[in-house]
Amino acid sequence: MFGNLGFSYIGFLFLLMLFVPNIIWLKGKPQEYTSEKENKILQFFERSGEALTCCCSLIFSDFNIHKANLWSLWLIAAFILMMMYEAWWIRYFRSERRVTDFYSDFLGIPVAGATLPVLAFFMLGMYGKVLCMLIAAIILGIGHIGIHIQHRLCVEKQD
């Protein structure tokens, strides 16, 4: 239920898929982007969720590939969501890189830059049957998706 301690190469791969585009984005944030006036409660959830999700991703070997069975569909779903996240970033980097592009939907998924990785890590938690990851992903989702929605609403008011 809490997971087996050990290194997860799948968790490491997911974190790479998460961090590489974010590091590239840091070098060229949209001019209109600001993290000022973010809800402090949502920030707490986001930061806590980020730390917990990163730790869980790496320290539970339950996320590594096992013998294929129906439960493997959770891992496939998680991987598809992460690939969609990468596709969202590609679309963003090819765009004008406005703040509205950053908070855009993708394939009908609202604020996809926040939603897709949260869902992927939740699915990874389901695959590994790791309660800690499920809780971490929920905490992350409350904060990260909440902040993105808050920013998106502010941007829409300005337009």
Image (cartoon, grey):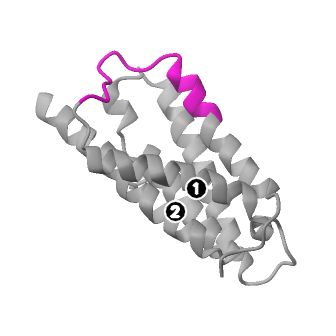
At a point 48% along the width and 31% down the height, the residue shown is 92
Q: Quadrant of residue 125?
A: bottom right
Could you tell me the amino acid type at mark 1? Thr
Q: From the viewer's perspective, is 146 left or right of 49?
A: left
Image x and y of residue 2, in percent: 66, 76
Q: Percent position (x, y) of residue 144?
A: 40, 49
Question: Who's the residue at 65% across and 54% down the image?
Answer: 55
Quickly name the residue at label 1: 53
Which quadrant is the N terminus positioned in?
bottom right
Q: For numbered disc 1, what is the local secondary structure? A: helix
- Which quadrant would the C terminus be assigned to in this image? top left
- Give the residues in magenta: 20-36
The crowd level at tag 1 (other Cα within 10 Å; few <14, some 14-19, many 20+) is many
Who is closer to the viewer here, 9 or 59? 59
Q: Tag 2 or tag 1, which sits nearer the N-term? A: 1
Q: Is residue 159 visible?
A: no
Which three-letter amino acid code belongs to the residue tagged 2? Ala
